[in-house]
Amino acid sequence: MQRIAMLGGGFIGRFYAESLHGQRSRDRVVAIYARREETAKKFADDYGCSVWSTDMEEVIAHPDVDMVCIALPNNLHEPAVQLCAKHKKNVVCTKPLGRNADEALRMVQVVEEAGIFAGYLEDLCYTPKFLKAMESVKNGALGRILWAKSRETHPGPHSNWFWDKEQAGGGCMLDLGCHCVEIARNFIGKDVRPVEVMCWAATQVKPIDAEDHAIALVKYENGAIGQFEVSWTFRGGMDLRDEVMGTEGTIWINNFLRTGFEMFTTGKGADYVAEKAESNTGWLFPVGDEVNDLGYNHMFTDMFFAAEEGREAAETFYDGYVVNAILDAAYKSAETKQWEPVNLPVWRGKEGLSQEQTLTDYDEQHYLIKEEVTHDGRHKVILKEKASGKIVERDLV
Amino acid sequence: MQRIAMLGGGFIGRFYAESLHGQRSRDRVVAIYARREETAKKFADDYGCSVWSTDMEEVIAHPDVDMVCIALPNNLHEPAVQLCAKHKKNVVCTKPLGRNADEALRMVQVVEEAGIFAGYLEDLCYTPKFLKAMESVKNGALGRILWAKSRETHPGPHSNWFWDKEQAGGGCMLDLGCHCVEIARNFIGKDVRPVEVMCWAATQVKPIDAEDHAIALVKYENGAIGQFEVSWTFRGGMDLRDEVMGTEGTIWINNFLRTGFEMFTTGKGADYVAEKAESNTGWLFPVGDEVNDLGYNHMFTDMFFAAEEGREAAETFYDGYVVNAILDAAYKSAETKQWEPVNLPVWRGKEGLSQEQTLTDYDEQHYLIKEEVTHDGRHKVILKEKASGKIVERDLV
Amino acid sequence: MQRIAMLGGGFIGRFYAESLHGQRSRDRVVAIYARREETAKKFADDYGCSVWSTDMEEVIAHPDVDMVCIALPNNLHEPAVQLCAKHKKNVVCTKPLGRNADEALRMVQVVEEAGIFAGYLEDLCYTPKFLKAMESVKNGALGRILWAKSRETHPGPHSNWFWDKEQAGGGCMLDLGCHCVEIARNFIGKDVRPVEVMCWAATQVKPIDAEDHAIALVKYENGAIGQFEVSWTFRGGMDLRDEVMGTEGTIWINNFLRTGFEMFTTGKGADYVAEKAESNTGWLFPVGDEVNDLGYNHMFTDMFFAAEEGREAAETFYDGYVVNAILDAAYKSAETKQWEPVNLPVWRGKEGLSQEQTLTDYDEQHYLIKEEVTHDGRHKVILKEKASGKIVERDLV
Amino acid sequence: MQRIAMLGGGFIGRFYAESLHGQRSRDRVVAIYARREETAKKFADDYGCSVWSTDMEEVIAHPDVDMVCIALPNNLHEPAVQLCAKHKKNVVCTKPLGRNADEALRMVQVVEEAGIFAGYLEDLCYTPKFLKAMESVKNGALGRILWAKSRETHPGPHSNWFWDKEQAGGGCMLDLGCHCVEIARNFIGKDVRPVEVMCWAATQVKPIDAEDHAIALVKYENGAIGQFEVSWTFRGGMDLRDEVMGTEGTIWINNFLRTGFEMFTTGKGADYVAEKAESNTGWLFPVGDEVNDLGYNHMFTDMFFAAEEGREAAETFYDGYVVNAILDAAYKSAETKQWEPVNLPVWRGKEGLSQEQTLTDYDEQHYLIKEEVTHDGRHKVILKEKASGKIVERDLV
């Protein structure tokens, strides 16, 4: 059983609490810290916490607390983690880990020095569909992974601090791109080094300093490509899709707007549909079980069993730091308009990979380009002559 | 915490155990009864049960057991329930409750006399999508419910007893129709009396005595119609869909084959895809989290909290008995080719409902049939003259 | 080239004209008859007809007319066909052919006696998806057809005569069921005799005499089952889906609401979306090319080439008559609550079919019920002993 | 009526002929040129051409020919166009127009000097869904367009010349990217200047000199972004999707793999499913009417009416040249790893556009960032103070 202190009583803190107390969970949120007293009190009431306070250290240090869950604005992650290290409390921290890789790396170092458990709350790497897809990828059902794209776009976050570049550290790219980067990194292989990033970002619609739309490519050492598309100006709800291409297969995941649940209503009895839905009449696409389908349940299950078993969670502070480093390169690229290298002072994966050979022998003289049965029943191969490089076609009988 | 005895170590017993031990559950399966010793032993090993036996009563009576979970062939439900009543152990029983309403009613009576908790494991009335849809229906988003259809078809069950009419009590209609009937009943209203049933059933493909395909209509006292379509000869996997029509809206739920998870694979690294999938190459449609998406998690959560809080679960033995009564009428109808009345010696819902009036006043002289804006921009109404019954059209300006 | 007289200038007449004059067509609508002069004039203007009149016989008899296209209320089909026969003009008639089989059979007989070409405008048996599906069914990709379901539901027709039982001959069942019946009949085999019908029909919402919701099963001589679901009270647009089950496969067709075209709009620049759409804001599902996707193009192409080549079209007056006969049985069944025989005084298909044997030999002693590889890798068969009827399971190595 | 000479009797030439002779078309392919005599003869036989030859000029110059349709490898487009200009024959040319913008611009100039009709056969800008989507975009249903993405990926082309960089001029980017670029350009506005391009391209799988996978961003003068994703190594069939984001809405189009037509088959009676399908068993996704759904019908209809009416087609040689110029920049960018300017020596659109202002006044002191109703019913706005730039939240009552 975990006795949890929640830091932050806003949208995401409450979402976490719903997941933590959901189903037949053995865990309890026992303490709540919020910046505003009324938020802390309401949260304590709603979720039955015996401890509430506007003093963060008091909550973290409380003897009833085993595990600290950070659900605060991005600029408060590092101070909170420092306090957890000081008081030797296990900690799980919401995404992104830092506002940049420097912050994130300091957090990695302080928790490792303190010897505490530190989990990175990257929920979208724990959605049921993602976990199942990862199994197939690991089993080789897709062959060698060539490209992994993740898209998260919606009409913008609910809390005001997101829109403030100082507190948030960035715009939609930091907020949403951190998910997408880690999803692609998982599919391509966490031990494959991300090498460089090309990014476009712009403020197309909102009156803010940070970007409200961004697209980037992340090149990995083995030649695979990660891609993300993020926006705070998308219309239609929350679009949450992943796509993976491998030499042997394809995966398409839709986590939100098209999950096999469709409703039309003239609007009588209108009510809450789903996170970031834009309407409650006409055709609607609710999600059955948001906390599960967004990965919260499987995430906390992994985190807490990991803490109890003395092992690492699937998503660690180190992962959060790698994600921040990739996003740092993306922000730099959006400014310089260059491919920017990913700067990783600490790297624990493979070194020196190169792209796989693309030459498949057909026979001694030829490489195979394609074998197919045509429209009209011909069985043919398209070949490349090794010596001349000439492309030839040959019918098989 | 519930300490559970599982009766039955087959496909469904294992599926239940996966759900019970999943996530951060506080509950444990502590005892297993199976008809074959090797099954009991293997189950005990796999799920860490301290008690295993081929003597059902011994397991039920064991002092470590709080709650008995019946996952046995249909003909063994009643004897198992009798033993639970005898030993005053709370019980949850897989679907269908009985092979017919007589058996089911006796089970209702014996658990009520014994004063034990008795939950009906109708998992498909606990899928996340179903629960969310029910909320919308209860809030009135669909208006008055006119029709509720549920379809479950697949290529046939895995265990041999299903194919034996004596043990199973019927074919695909009892096996799958029990889900569909209860789904429709929930949407239409559990307190609305099912009045009569028209059913077609046939053995179209399999060399068995029971039906392998059936379709039925269930008429409710308020004029609403329930419909089910079930088959053990469907090709393509497990088709699990619900559709509801109301005066103000529509709901379409796809629980299995089209849930936003799509995979193509040439077959390298092929593995288990999902329950009743027919292939592991080409385009596949896995489910992210089967035990959750099929309702097991939410079902056991409701059952155990209900038992602990001294309240009824959402699905009770009484519900199981009503379902059996409807299916009894369906079986009879398939033979007599008549609409057959639903025989409910015990009925605890509303009495004397009638179909709602369909006349909507437009003005003193007319009823409104339809108001619309046409293709070419006319705003018109179609009306029925109250006096003459004549249909007239009128342009609105 | 066909020089066409259109009878009827309403919704469907205009839809037909759009198709006839669409693309690079060689055909022209040269004449228009409408009951109201202003309708005839407007139509003539819009589509460039040189002849317009409120005298039907004048239009049919006009020397510029080769082909008459009947797009009139149901009660006027027979008189129009009689005039075509009298003037020996080829004729194509919208669906349903008659208000009942008596009318339809008289139309069959009069056109055959007159020796004119007579095509039945069953557009939904000409949609591109349907035609492609029929090819697969004919090639055996689905094996033996067990069940064919067609569903057409929407919020009700646009013209007032539909709502008048005398002119229309019935409600949604005649209007929409005629499509569904013919679709299922095609999949099952047009030469297989429909034997009996069980139907439920009700007026659940609209203040009309005819039914606004109906469901029926049609039993064919070879044991296959046709099913239709029709309604004028569906909310959400026009739902147009077919499903076919065979021993070797499945086909699902969605002709309208889910065709791979999805749009969200806040409502700025709102415009016509698609036939029977209920809204022009929020999530919308337009159709790319309605006249093509609803089958009109392929239908007229077949009709006119058939007329020019002296062959029958794929859908003839005889087909229209069989459809009417099935619907007559459905109406009767809805009243008597019995399975009602399909009365076919003229039948030109196969006689004396029976349901196929379901026994598949496994070896001399057993029938095969199912062969499968289980979850945990066992390869097993479920068999039925021929002598005892016992169900047994056997592992294959 | 158009009397057409087809240049090229391969895959695409035959596809064109199917469309040209389809439905009730008034047009005929009367002449065929192919490089190999047997191809020319077979084509002439199959489509009833009276003229066939392996001498291109002879066919173009033939007096029976009104219109020349170029369906040849990319390196032969320019010589064929030169001959059409010389003989003053109207011409339509398959995509891409040239192998690069230099070739394309010369083609534009020669046809304009000759005064002949010249249409660019960009079929994917004529699909029914695209045309319908363009209508909505033009009507403003999506507001200001922010981003338009088009994706075409499949397992590689059928003819061997595609794989030869000299004949083809490039790899999948030229072959498929030309579609995607023009689709995005239409949505964003053809008169908006494409400014610069960032592209990643690689040869990940095939043993060829050209790229088999590429992704690019195209920046337009008004700040809108076009995106394309193309590959010859995708597994699962032909993925053909467009997505558009505007300030007021979203459009998602799926032209091929998910169009509401789904089939499962065990493989009995297996046959041709659709262009570039990879399998004919399991779950398959055929297209109802390929020539229509891929845009061929609407394309030729527009082309020929344009030629007959003396107007330009919707897609002209000038458009083909702009597309080539964008792709030239993409190829250069893939090498230099820089954003490369689009070089347009001839430009006929708007000049001097700039990105729209993103500041929306809320009141005198504030800009509006977001207005929303939260989860728990609060109606709030998030604002930015004009003076300080501070983000504030305010509840509305």
Image: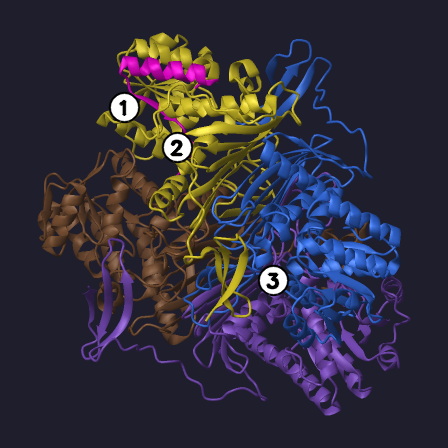
Chain colours: A yellow, B brown, C purple, D blue
Residue C29 lies in the magenta-colored region = no
* Mark pair 2, 3: CA separation: 62 Å
Q: Nearer the viewer, residue B131 or D132?
A: D132
Q: Nearer the viewer, mark 2 or mark 3?
A: 2
Q: Is residue C216 visible?
A: no
* Mark pair 1, 2: CA separation: 34 Å
Residue at the extreme right: C50
- Crowding near the residue tagged with mark 2, few <14, some 14–19, many ≥20 C-alpha atoms within 10 Å: many
Q: Position of D131 compared to B225: left or right?
A: right
Q: Nearer the viewer, mark 1 or mark 3?
A: 1
Q: Can you say whether C130 is above or below A212 in the image?
A: below
Do the residues at discs 1 and 2 belong to one chain? yes
Q: Position of C170 compared to B70: left or right?
A: right
The amino acid sitting under disc 3 is Asp
Q: What element does badge 3 sit on?
A: loop
The residue that disc 2 covers is A192
* Mark pair 1, 3: CA separation: 58 Å
Numbered badge on residue B395: none
Numbered badge on residue A2: 1
Q: Nearer the viewer, residue A243 or C274?
A: A243
The residue that disc 3 covers is C212
Query: Magenta segment, which residues?
Result: A98-127
Residue D384 in the image: state x and y as whole percent: 64, 16
Do the residues at discs 1 and 3 belong to one chain? no
Residue D246 in the image: state x and y as whole percent: 67, 36
Residue D347 in the image: state x and y as whole percent: 80, 38
Residue at left offset 62%, top offset 60%: C232
Are the residues flagged by discs 2 and 3 in contact, CB closer than 8 Å? no
